[in-house]
Image (cartoon, helix red, strand yellow):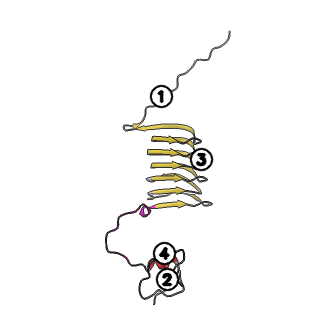
């Protein structure tokens, strides 16, 4: 009988039924119970959980480069020079510092740097975006904050910049 590196108990001779409760079958770790489940030969439909997702949990700090992540979930702290992904979610209490380019972004924590959301950006009531923000669609809930520069993306690229009118200072003479 084969043993898995995570369990000291031998695997059963026949595949175990999936555990329905929080406890795995006696003598088996949850990991080895999943390994023992029978596999279907039918093609799988990709579920949202099958996407390449990086979750930086609460209390965890990450610095550096992230490559090939489709979805980035920040619950802790991430500092990066450039990240590209399809989706970014910064949870309440999460902090992202640096530059990020995504299709969709949802911010309930803090982003400090440059954020480009090619489609939509949602800033939740607890969210703060500091720095330069580029997006095609913007939704800010009551209490959400954006501080810095906002550029709206149009179908032709970035919207033309409109300079505020300059007011000449009058001097009393």
Mark 3 secondary-structure assignment? loop
Residue with the mark numbered 4: 20
Does the CB distance between marks 1 and 3 fall below 8 Å?
Answer: no
How far apart marks 1 and 3 lie (CA) works out to 29 Å
Residue with the mark numbered 1: 162
- Going from N to C along the chain, the mark reached first, 4 or 3, is 4
How far apart marks 4 and 2 lie (CA) works out to 21 Å
- Can you see residue 100? no
Where is 31 relative to 73, above or below?
below
Mark 2 secondary-structure assignment? loop
- Disc 3: CA contacts within 10 A as few (<14), some (14-19) or many (>=20): some
Where is 163 relative to 3, above or below?
above
Residue 142 placement: quadrant: top right
How far apart marks 4 and 3 lie (CA) works out to 37 Å
Mark 1 secondary-structure assignment? loop
How far apart marks 1 and 4 lie (CA) works out to 60 Å
Q: Which residues are magenta?
A: 38-52
User: For this view, does 82 lie left or right of residue 58?
Assistant: left
Comparing 79 with 89, the one in front is 89
Residue with the mark numbered 3: 126
Where is 84 relative to 60, above or below?
above
How far apart marks 3 and 2 lie (CA) works out to 44 Å
Q: Residue at x 49, y 56 (%)?
A: 72
Residue 78 place in picture, x, y as percent: 57, 55
Q: Which labelled disc corresponds to residue 146?
A: none
Residue with the mark numbered 2: 4
């Amino acid at each position: 009988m084969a043993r898995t590196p995570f369990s000291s108990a031998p695997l059963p001779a026949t595949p175990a039924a999936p555990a329905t409760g929080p406890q795995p079958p006696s003598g088996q770790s949850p990991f080895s119970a999943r390994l023992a489940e029978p596999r279907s030969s039918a093609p799988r439909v990709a579920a949202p959980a099958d996407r390449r997702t990086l979750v930086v949990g609460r209390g965890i700090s990450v610095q550096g480069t992230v490559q090939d992540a489709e979805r980035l979930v920040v619950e802790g702290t991430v500092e990066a020079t450039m990240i590209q992904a399809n989706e970014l979610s910064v949870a309440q209490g999460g902090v992202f510092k640096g530059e990020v380019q995504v299709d969709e972004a949802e911010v309930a924590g803090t982003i400090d740097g440059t954020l480009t959301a090619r489609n939509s950006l949602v800033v939740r009531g607890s969210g703060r975006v500091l720095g330069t923000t580029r997006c095609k669609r913007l939704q800010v809930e009551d209490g959400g904050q954006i501080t810095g520069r906002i550029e709206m993306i149009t179908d032709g690229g970035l919207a033309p910049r409109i300079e505020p009118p300059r007011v000449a200072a009058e001097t009393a003479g």
